[in-house]
Amino acid sequence: MCPLSDEALLDWALAPAEADPAVDRHLGECPSCRTRSQAVLREVADLRAKLAAEPDRRRHHRDLARLLGRIGEIDEDERVVRGWLSRDAMDPEALTLLADLTARRGERDRAVRTLASVVEVQPGDKAAHERMARLYERLGRLEDACPHRVTLAALSPSDEAAAAAATRCESTGEGPPAEEVRGELVATATFEGGADVDLAIVLRDGTRVSWMGGKRNVRVGEATSVQGERLAIGFLPNGSYTIEVESIDPQFNAGSSVGPTSSIRSSCTWIATRIGIRRSACIMR
Ligand SMILES: [Zn+2]
């Protein structure tokens, strides 16, 4: 199996001369990665053609949007997701992908609002409420988290932990205890320069996992710190994952630190195996 991310492989397939030198060196001596890079190229062309031929099929929007998310083609991805939403403005999956993309651009407040709209179109969805409750708790916005805790308790009358969490926030205004950041994949980043930066992992299906959730068993430390952040995922199958570091653009985020944060976006590919994690390629731009 080729250990490089599909994003790195596609960049190489499109323009080997402009690709990361480490990636180029690896591809020069690895036939399986060269084969894989051509397969990715074909897959993208295929899905684009399918969507163009049948623009009203939800599945084509979904498949292409997820593939583009995985390979980091954020601009095109957003066009596809918006085209999907123009056909069904209430599709929770499309709204969630739009929130992921917005977050990947560093527009955190707008991403949070988009995720909140997912709950509005699915008021009975426990996972969506849980995601919002946790997200607001990590931001320290306990007054925004509490209504979701109360709803969760109402949706699960026999769940004692849900009831306790609702009572805690309603009667004491307190947040949950600090999370224990451990799991099969733990990513830690420390930052210099005083900018708020988010750490995210992009899964094979294009889903972005971060302090904003995206997967069960996500644990986060210091989500809004300007010094660093830790992100852990409880369980991950073997495979390659892209770790992204995104600077939060203060222009779009009232509570963020000020300072000249150019739009940095870097990504590293890590390989998760049962025996550990191995870094294979890191691309800074
Ligand atoms: Zn290889």
Image (cartoon, helix red, strand yellow):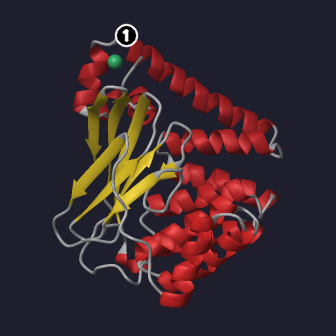
Q: Which amino acid does label 1 sit on?
A: Pro
Query: Is residue 86 rendered to the left or right of residue 140?
Result: right
> Which sits in the foreground, 281 or 14?
281
- Counting from the top left corner in percent of width and height, residue 114 is at 61, 69
Instruction: Please tell me which residue is depicted at 76% across the width and 40% down the height of the picture.
Output: 59
Q: In which quarter of the image is the N terminus?
A: top left
Disc 1 residue lies near ligand 1 with CB under 8 A: no
- Counting from the top left corner in percent of width and height, residue 144 is at 55, 82
Residue 127 can be seen, yes or no: yes
Q: In this view, does 72 lie above or below 248?
A: above
Q: Residue 24 occupies which quadrant of the picture?
A: top left
**Residue occupied by mark 1:** 31
- Judged from the image, the quadrant occupied by ligand 1 is top left
Query: Is residue 54 rendered to the left or right of residue 255?
Result: right
- Counting from the top left corner in percent of width and height, residue 194 is at 20, 73
Q: Is residue 210 above or below residue 25?
A: below
Residue 285 can be seen, yes or no: no
